[in-house]
Amino acid sequence: QVQLVESGGGLVQAGGSLRLSCAASGRTSSSFTMAWFRQAPGKERDVVAAISWFGGRTYYEDSVKGRFTITRDNAKNTVYLQMNSLKPEDTAVYYCAAEYKSNPALGRVQDYTYWGQGTQVTVSS
């Protein structure tokens, strides 16, 4: 069993930055893939970025490439999402997810078993 706890959301003006953190506890593994999803009101939950625990391979959704960076700190069992040049359309609840597969291309909600509670990110124009 794995527990995920997100932090770092908040309100920021367009063009600003935020860093989200996701701390994993429990039965973590070097074969993990961890990802960030987001869900805006009335929309589906979509993948934003993912990273493999071993090797640090990454995946980014097209709209965030060049603006968001996903990293991990294996010693702290924590994944980060650095979000720069934020836009109002980035407003959503951001969720951390984890799965026991080493494949950052996992991009569907059903690909992940473990989820955090979500953290709100609001970007004002």
Image: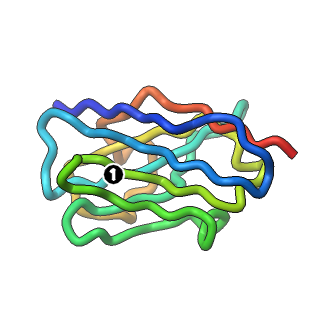
Q: Is residue 77 left or right of residue 117?
A: left
The spot of residue 10 in percent (x, y) is 63, 35
Label 1: few (<14), some (14–19) or many (≥20) C-alpha neighbours in 10 Å = many
Quadrant of the image containing the N terminus:
top left
Pick whichever, 39 or 53, lies toward us.
53
Question: How many numbered marks are there?
Answer: 1
Q: Which residue occupies 76% across, 49% down?
A: 89
Q: Which residue occupies 51% across, 38% down?
A: 8
Q: Secondary structure at mark 1?
A: strand
The amino acid on which the numbered mark 1 sits, given as a three-letter code, is Met
Name the residue that disc number 1 marks: 34
The spot of residue 93 in percent (x, y) is 60, 35
Q: Quadrant of residue 123?
A: top right
Indicate whether 57 appears above or below 33: below
The spot of residue 38 in percent (x, y) is 57, 43
Q: Which residue occupies 41% across, 52% down?
A: 80
Pick whichever, 68 or 98, lies toward us.
68
Q: Which residue occupies 48% across, 58% down?
A: 49
